Image (cartoon, helix red, strand yellow):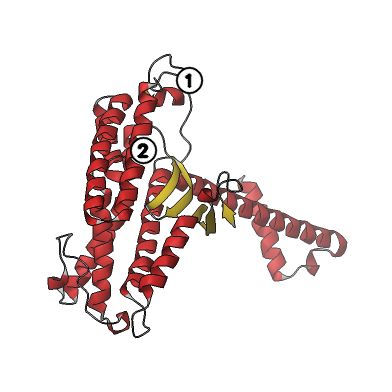
Amino acid sequence: MFAGQGYRDNPINWSLTLGRVFGIRVRMHLLFILWIVFRFLSDALSEDGSIGVWAVITVFLFGTVLLHEFGHCFGARAVGGDADDILLWPLGGLATVDAPMNPRAQFITTAAGPMVNVVFCVLAATLFALTGNAERLSLNPFHLMMVSSGSVTQWGFADWLVVFWSINYLLLLFNLLPTFPMDGGRLLQAIIWKYRDYRTATLVATLVGMVGAIIFGLIGLATEQFLLLGIAFFGYFTCWQQRQMVKAGAFETDNEFGYDFSKGFDAFQEGKQNKPSWLARRRTAKLARKAEQDRQRQAEREKHIDDILDKVHREGMQSLTPSEKRILQSETDRKQQV
């Protein structure tokens, strides 16, 4: 179904729920759906009617971005937080996570996304070496996607590997640019926060992000890359919004919110224990299921013993089968030990 805050009143918020994985809802924004349809209609079919290169790149990009966002979600769960939603849209992916507000937790949650791309890049590089196609591996981001000409139905394994490597390598480099609110900017914020305070870290990271957004915008105008222009606008607006919150005193002592934010949101978290991690909650649930199974088995055993004792009362010991005698003797020995 289509979902999103205010989706009935504002179509720009429409998104399609694709399903739930590990308790995380995966949604696709309406604009992303329209972008995919446009790409397939304009570039998906080549002249001979076969699937085009852009159709393949779109599928690979969709899957890679989704796994990248799952990395953020599992990173948040690993540090005691939680995650319940992933939104895919034309400018990338947005994972809704609730990680503890401290530098270490925020750094791990942010770094977990790019680490997915690092793992895939290592895997691709290993396959390049093992298959004797090391010359197809390029570290130059301006000379990627060196696939064979012709229809993708005629591609070999190395051509598919080039696409897999290129998408993960480009996403890794792009996300690690130190421009807030991308992963690189958030990592920069967490590092500064460790040695200073949350307010200073946010001011520095957002300033770098605004400069980076202006550079992206100029490159987008020069190359007529409207997607880059969209990323630049989104990044600049997000940084500007964060800075306005700081200037309004949202992170100062005795601010309008009534909390001391001088050390980030730690003051808000005082006296409140962090939520158990996803792994801890899973282990707790597993132990609870095991305890319930043990309880049921014990209840069944006690009922069986009661039936045996009732049989002895009615028909005598000679009526018991060898199996029933062993069960009765085992229970007698257990009670004697207790």
- Camera-side residue of 14 and 223: 223
Q: Disc 1 to disc 2, how far (Cα)?
A: 23 Å
Q: Are marks 1 and 2 in contact (CB under 8 Å)?
A: no
Circle 2 sits in a helix, a strand or a loop, which is it?
helix
- Horizontally, residue 221 falls left or right of residue 253, namely left
Which is in the foreground here, disc 1 or disc 2?
Answer: 2
**For the C terminus, which image quadrant?**
top right
Q: On the image, which quarter does residue 227 sit in?
A: bottom left
Q: Of the residues under marks 1 and 2, which one precedes in the sequence?
A: 2
Q: The disc labelled 1 sits on which kind of residue?
A: Phe
Res 52 label: none
- At horizontal 42% and vertical 38% (from top left) the residue drawn is 99
Where is 208 relative to 121, above or below?
A: above
Residue 251, image x and y in percent?
38, 22
Q: Is residue 49 visible?
A: yes
Where is 173 relative to 320, above or below?
A: above
The residue that mark 1 highlights is 257
The residue that mark 2 highlights is 237
Circle 1 sits in a helix, a strand or a loop, which is it?
loop
Q: Identify the residue at the far right of this view.
A: 314
